[in-house]
Amino acid sequence: MYDTAMRILLIEDDREAAVYLSKALREAGHAIDHAADGEEGAHLASEGSYDVMVVDRMLPKRDGLSVVEDMRGRGDDTPVLILSALGQVDDRVTGLRAGGDDYLTKPYAFSELLARVEALARRRKPGEVETNYTVGDLVLDRLSHTVSRSGSPIVLQPREFRLLEYLMKNAGQVVTRTMLLENVWDYHFDPQTNVIDVHISRLRGKIDKGFEHALLHTVRGAGYMISDANR
């Protein structure tokens, strides 16, 4: 049994199946986000940070394979288990070539799905999956998707959460603008754009304003750093 909690994105349009899977995965100790169509799933995949994704192949608005292909195209290596009623060899090969890491044919037993999800998580992260980041009195919980400082909750927008998560993952290290664009926004463009400045400013206002000392620092000419050390 996998003894580390995971954050899982489930993209499944069948309401009954989604409710059943979400409930069963939560009972197994994992945190679940659910999307009912391909467009919503693609949005959550780009905004969130997941340990594993479970993606139905045939979805409304956008099919599951195109969601996975786009993820791989922007360098997202989150393990993906594809679910499908299409079980011929050619169907499985197509799913795996689209970027899926595993392929499970419907109908399936939940015990097998859970075992496959756990195997994908172990394959990606052989050690313990880190679910919390702490810098001083600032705490980010990846599973509950919450942030607090000195015990007071801080409400962040999805992109702000992802930005803070990346900074805290690299706490004490300088993070360049290019690194943020590639790892938080998932694309490459002119690093002189002010999109980073805007988000950093908003984030700083939420995590530092009103507290005795700042945690988010600008390293002139280099980038940004989150650190509890006074600078």
Image (spheres, rainbow, N blue to C red):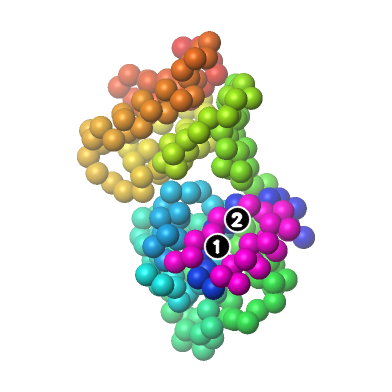
Looking at the image, can residue 83 be seen? yes
Image mark for residue 161: none
Q: Is residue 4 magenta?
A: no
Q: Which residue is mark 1?
A: 10
Q: Amino acid at mark 2?
A: Ile
- Residue 22 is inside the magenta segment: yes
Measured from the top left, where is residue 65 in percent x and y? 42, 71
Camera-nearest residue between 58 and 165: 58
Residue at 73% from the left image edge and 58% from the top image edge? 28
Which residue occupies the extreme bottom position in the image? Answer: 88
User: Is residue 119 placed above or below 106 in the rendered structure?
Assistant: above
SS at badge 2: strand
Image side of residue 43 versus residue 192, left or right = right
Q: Position of residue 48 (x, y in %)?
A: 48, 49
Amino acid type shown at disc 1: Leu
Relative to 74, say whether 207 is above or below.
above
Q: On the image, numbered disc 2 is attached to which residue? A: 32
Q: Tell me where the magenta segment starts and ends, as one range.
A: 15-37
Spatial separation of the CA atoms under disc 2 and disc 1: 7 Å
Contact (Cβ within 8 Å) of mark 2 with mark 1 = yes
Percent across and percent down for residue 18 are 59, 67
x 36%, y 48%: residue = 186
Does 25 sit above or below residue 93?
Answer: above
Q: Secondary structure at mark 1?
A: strand
